[in-house]
Image: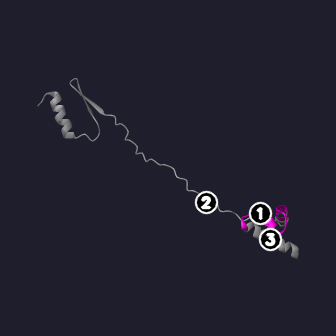
Amino acid sequence: MNSKQRKWAKQVAQWRKSGLSSEEYGPKLGVTGRCVRRWAQKLKVARPRRQRAREPRLMRVEVVTAAPAAEQPVVVQVGGRRVAVVSGFSKATLAAVLEVVEGRS
């Protein structure tokens, strides 16, 4: 890189850091904005990457507990009468119900 290229590489780097358009920055150097852009292209001076502020993406979450499956009762038929029993039913209570249904109490 010769001295002219080094000079312009420095100028273009300063232009990029300034945040000004080439049309605004060029006159400060006594040249047109087009001239500044041409040198930037010719020297391929990279533009500084702008950090984009990323907003966190939020989503509403609703926690739903699964309802227990409907339990199918066991049907007991005694003397023409039916008694439906689900699991966990007390044996003593079932015996008392059957006594009543059979008419033993």
The residue labelled by disc 2 is: 53
Question: Circle 1: is it few (<14), some (14-19), or many (20+) Cα within 10 Å?
Answer: few
**Is residue 33 highlighted in magenta?**
yes
Determine the residue located farthest toward the bottom in the rendered image. 3
**58 or 41: which is nearer to us?**
41
**34 or 43: which is nearer to us?**
34
- Identify the amino acid type marked 1: Glu
Q: Position of residue 12 (x, y in %)?
A: 79, 68
The residue labelled by disc 3 is: 11
- Identify the amino acid type marked 2: Ala
Q: Which of the two discs, 2 and 1, labels the residue nearer the N terminus?
A: 1
Q: Which of the two discs, 3 and 1, labels the residue nearer the N terminus?
A: 3
Question: Is residue 84 in sight in this rendering?
Answer: yes
Q: Which quadrant of the figure has residue 102? A: top left
Instruction: Give the residue displayed 21% in from the left and 40% down from the top.
Output: 91
In the structure shown, which secondary structural element does the residue marked by tag 2 occupy? loop
Which image quarter holds the N terminus?
bottom right
Q: Position of residue 51 (x, y in %)?
A: 65, 62
Task: Give yes or no for contact between labels 2 and 1 (Cβ–Cβ under 8 Å).
Answer: no
> Across the whole image, how many numbered discs are drawn on residues?
3
In the structure shown, which secondary structural element does the residue marked by tag 3 occupy? helix
> Which of the two discs, 3 and 1, sits closer to the camera?
1
Q: Position of residue 82 (x, y in %)?
A: 24, 27
Task: Give yes or no for contact between labels 2 and 3 (Cβ–Cβ under 8 Å).
Answer: no
Instruction: Give the residue displayed 15% in from the left and 32% down from the top.
Output: 99
- Identify the amino acid type marked 3: Gln
Which image quarter holds the C terminus?
top left
**In this rendering, would 70 be left or right of 21?**
left
Magenta region, residue range: 18-37
